[in-house]
Image (spheres, helix red, strand yellow):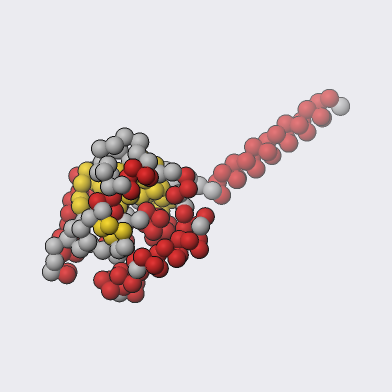
Amino acid sequence: MKRIAAVTLALAALSLVAFAGHGVAQSPVPSKTAVAIFAAGCFWCVEADFDKVEGVLSTTSGYTGGREMDPTYAQVSSGATGHTEAVEIVYDPAKVSYRQLLDHFWRNVDPFAKNRQFCDSGPQYRSAIFYRTDEERALAEASKKAVADKFGRAVETEVAPAAAFYRAEDYHQDFHLKNSAKYKFYRWNCGRDRRLQELWGKASS
């Protein structure tokens, strides 16, 4: 009797292991991920724009490109830290390439605005591509030249090496989801989509 009970317990344990393994197989984690950092004005909007891209796994609002360590929103928004609002994008290169992310970036930025984006002004809202490798730098520079050639104008967007990225306060993360009405009003009032359509056409956003 004890032997039968032991066999029954062993079979049940094996069933649980098999079930657990099956659950993991249903939610595969990409074996390789990569990171891109872009600045295009208000990071609420940049997060929302890149969340739409297939292959993007996560977006995080933050601050980079400046001198101050562990800056706060109040410090960055003063324009005195040298930081700009930016978004760190974790993506699956098997589903979306860095080149494709660059294409999406350009269609969601005003490349001709210096030290501002849309209704927000100051160096803390400057647009930038922060590269991590020589390959990313080459792709960023080539894409910047292509935009300049397309419009026949100088592009103000900065291409710079990635530095320390500081995560913004929790209330900024996923703002477009947690405060949808406020986000939509801000975006409309700022004229972001109107300007993007002027530059890139209806497929910009």
Residue situated in front as seen by the camera: 148 or 181:
181
**Residue 26 x %, y %:** 56, 49
Q: The N terminus lies in which quarter of the figure?
A: top right
Q: Residue 180 versus residue 197: which sits nearer the camera?
A: 180
Quarter of the image containing the C terminus? bottom left
Front-most of 134 and 152? Answer: 152
Residue 99 visible at all = no
For this orientation, the residue located farthest to the right is 1
Q: Is residue 119 left or right of residue 56?
A: left
Q: Residue at x 29, y 54 (%)?
A: 125
Residue 193: percent from the left, percent from the top? 35, 69
| Residue 116 position within the rendered picture, expressed as x and y whole percent measured from the top left | 26, 58
Which of the 4 image quadrants contains residue 148?
bottom left
Horizontally, residue 139 falls left or right of residue 74, namely left
Taking 201 as reference, is 10 left or right? right
Decide if residue 49 is in sight here.
yes
| Viewer-nearest residue: 73 or 201 | 73
Whole-percent x and y of residue 83? 28, 44
Q: Residue at x 54, y 48 (%)?
A: 27
Q: Is residue 55 above or below residue 65?
A: below
Q: Pick out the residue farthest to the top.
A: 2
Is 24 displayed left or right of 109 in the figure?
right
